[in-house]
């Protein structure tokens, strides 16, 4: 594999020049001494004068030459031994020019360790450095010999590879190997870590291609891969340019929207599958953006999390939803899915409890949803937050169960009140026997642990009936209607006589809206 030392020339000619100059000066002095010994004073003076001139030239030339031997910047990252960003940029441009002459392209694979800062904060910077060195070793092991591998900054790595016009399969295989190896638990500095990497790829070719264009495309793909969050490698697509424009618009207007309550709650119905009774709502966000139009939480919440505003958005939605739900039937609950980054906030429990108190909303009617991914970064802190919430009577649900590698360990570690099955299993359980078997096993596990199981993403009556047959307790999804705004949910509850002072009517159908 190429590195900085492969193309750095040694200043051999410069060294030889100075050695010869010094030797010549010494020889002239020796000749002058001999001439004096034989009584030839005048020639000796001439020789000594010439030697003085020569040594003076050497003296003044040394300072000018010396920086040339030391001014070559360090081209290695000191921690990992990989190439650094400046060298990568220069060598990458040369690789692109060479590839063009050979009618080839150049592909860039970017790799970013998921939640690296949280890992370093939880396990210590020594463990963080060891993880970076581990990633560097995996990259060196897997990259082809002609690749240039570099650490850009922080936890971002790049691998530059010349490719044939139809050579994407080679890059795909490399990305898959990296994803598998880096997803395996590894023991570093007496800590077992299970990192996951976001991997993105881009390719350029042609006379006008530049390394800056390639890096920008790979950066856009990396942002999309991190937003998607499933750990699967992702190639750059031109549509990501428009996605970045949308992302920038969201970032620019998000704080203004929060300040003016432009982000409003939407309520998705949750149903008891056994009785068809409405039990509560999961709350998400909805934003009528001035230029992007109506956008849902799955579009703006990943951006809010990336720029550190997901906590403020969630608390704003809580305040609005709780304030409106105070006169609902006491049996109805509100469930809030929180972002993974929020569980890195040691004050999260206090913020939620403060919001409850300010709104006058009963704690037992509130449920907080946490994903397995959120637990991974700092289990100890997550346990502290969860226990603080539980002590106030707030319920806890494990969301998207089945998507993590250590689901059973999480069930033992935290006192969950409910488990919600990953929607992917629910959507495919009728068509895919394996998904059906997994859902059945999860429901049976819930029975054994006395944990109610809820199914998210219900879309059809056939899946609902199958879930009812195997004993799944609750369901939610498009089958029960679209998410409702505040006015719509109040109208629904009034019709069902589930507002304060209105006697409840008997349930007639699980279909709640539409």
Image (spheres, grey):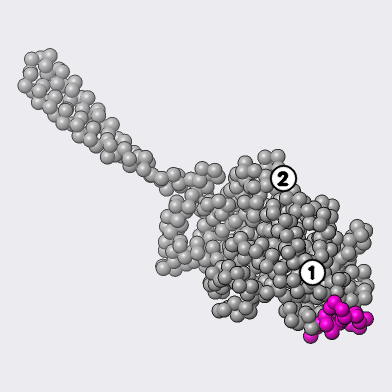
Name which residue lies at 37% across and 40% down: 70
According to the picture, the residue beneath numbered tag 2 turns out to be 192
Task: Find residue 334 and report its horizontal and vertical position in percent.
Answer: 79, 69
Q: Which secondary structure lies at badge 2?
A: strand
Q: Which secondary structure lies at badge 1?
A: strand
According to the picture, the residue beneath numbered tag 1 turns out to be 334
Query: What crowding class fits label 2: few (fewer than 14 Cα within 10 Å), some (14-19), or many (20 or more)?
Result: few
Task: Find residue 72 and report its horizontal and vertical position in percent.
Answer: 38, 44
Q: Viewer-proximal residue, 251 or 498?
A: 498
Name which residue lies at 62% across and 78% down: 288
Image quadrant in which you'd find residue 43: top left
State which region is magenta. 492-514
39 over 385 or under it: above or below:
above
Judge left or right: residue 385 versus residue 137. Answer: right
31 over 73 or under it: above or below:
above
Closer to the camera: disc 1 or disc 2?
A: 1
- Check residue 511 for magenta coloring: yes
Task: Find residue 112 and report its horizontal and vertical position in percent.
Answer: 60, 56
Image quadrant in which you'd find residue 333: bottom right
Query: What crowding class fits label 1: few (fewer than 14 Cα within 10 Å), some (14-19), or many (20 or more)?
Result: many
Image quadrant in which you'd find residue 243: bottom right
Q: Is residue 424 visible?
A: no
- Check residue 387 for magenta coloring: no
Quadrant into which the C terminus falls: bottom right
- CA separation, marks 1 and 2? 37 Å
């Amino acid at each position: 594999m190429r590195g900085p030392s492969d193309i750095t020339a040694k200043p051999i000619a410069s060294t030889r020049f100075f050695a010869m100059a010094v030797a010549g000066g010494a020889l002239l002095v020796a000749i002058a001494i001999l001439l004096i010994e034989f009584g030839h004073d005048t020639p000796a003076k001439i020789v000594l004068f010439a030697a003085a001139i020569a040594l003076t030239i050497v003296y003044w030339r040394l300072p000018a030459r010396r920086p040339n031997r030391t001014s070559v910047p360090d081209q290695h990252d000191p921690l990992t031994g990989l190439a650094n960003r400046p060298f990568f940029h220069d060598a990458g441009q040369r690789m692109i020019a060479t590839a063009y002459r050979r009618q080839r392209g150049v592909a860039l694979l970017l790799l970013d360790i998921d939640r690296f800062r949280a890992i370093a904060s939880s396990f210590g910077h020594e463990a963080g450095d060891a993880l970076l060195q581990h990633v560097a070793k995996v990259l060196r092991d897997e990259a082809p010999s002609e690749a240039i591998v570099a650490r850009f900054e922080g936890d971002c790595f790049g691998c530059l590879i010349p490719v044939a016009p139809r050579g994407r399969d080679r890059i795909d295989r490399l990305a898959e190997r990296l994803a598998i190896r880096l997803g395996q638990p590894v023991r570093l500095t007496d800590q077992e870590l299970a990192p996951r990497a976001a991997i993105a790829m881009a390719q350029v070719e042609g006379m006008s291609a530049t390394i800056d264009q390639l890096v920008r495309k790979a950066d856009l793909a990396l942002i999309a891969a991190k937003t998607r969050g499933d750990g699967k490698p992702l190639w750059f697509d031109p549509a990501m340019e428009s996605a970045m424009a949308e992302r920038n618009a969201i970032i620019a207007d998000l704080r203004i929207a929060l300040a003016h309550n432009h982000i409003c709650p939407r309520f998705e119905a949750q149903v008891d599958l056994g009785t068809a009774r409405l039990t509560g709502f999961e709350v998400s966000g909805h934003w009528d953006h001035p230029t992007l139009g109506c956008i849902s939480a799955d579009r703006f919440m990943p951006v809010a999390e990336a720029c550190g505003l997901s906590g403020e958005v969630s608390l704003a939605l809580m305040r609005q939803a709780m304030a409106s739900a105070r006169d609902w039937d006491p049996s109805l609950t509100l469930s809030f899915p929180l972002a993974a980054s929020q569980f890195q906030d040691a004050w999260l429990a206090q913020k939620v409890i403060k919001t409850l108190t300010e709104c006058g909303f009963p704690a037992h009617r509130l449920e907080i949803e946490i994903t397995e991914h959120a637990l991974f970064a700092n289990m100890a802190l997550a346990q502290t937050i969860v226990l603080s919430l539980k002590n106030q009577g707030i319920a806890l649900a494990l969301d998207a169960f089945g998507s993590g590698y250590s689901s059973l360990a999480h069930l033992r570690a935290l006192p969950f009140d409910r488990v919600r099955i990953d929607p992917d299993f629910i959507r495919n359980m009728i068509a895919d026997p394996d998904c059906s078997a997994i859902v059945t096993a999860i429901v049976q596990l819930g029975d054994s642990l006395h944990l109610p199981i809820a199914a998210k993403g219900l879309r059809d009556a056939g899946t609902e009936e199958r879930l009812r047959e195997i004993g799944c307790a609750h369901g939610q999804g498009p089958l029960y209607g679209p998410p409702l705004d505040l006015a719509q949910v109040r109208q629904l509850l009034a019709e069902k006589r589930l507002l304060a002072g209105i006697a409840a009517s008997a349930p007639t159908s699980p279909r709640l809206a539409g």
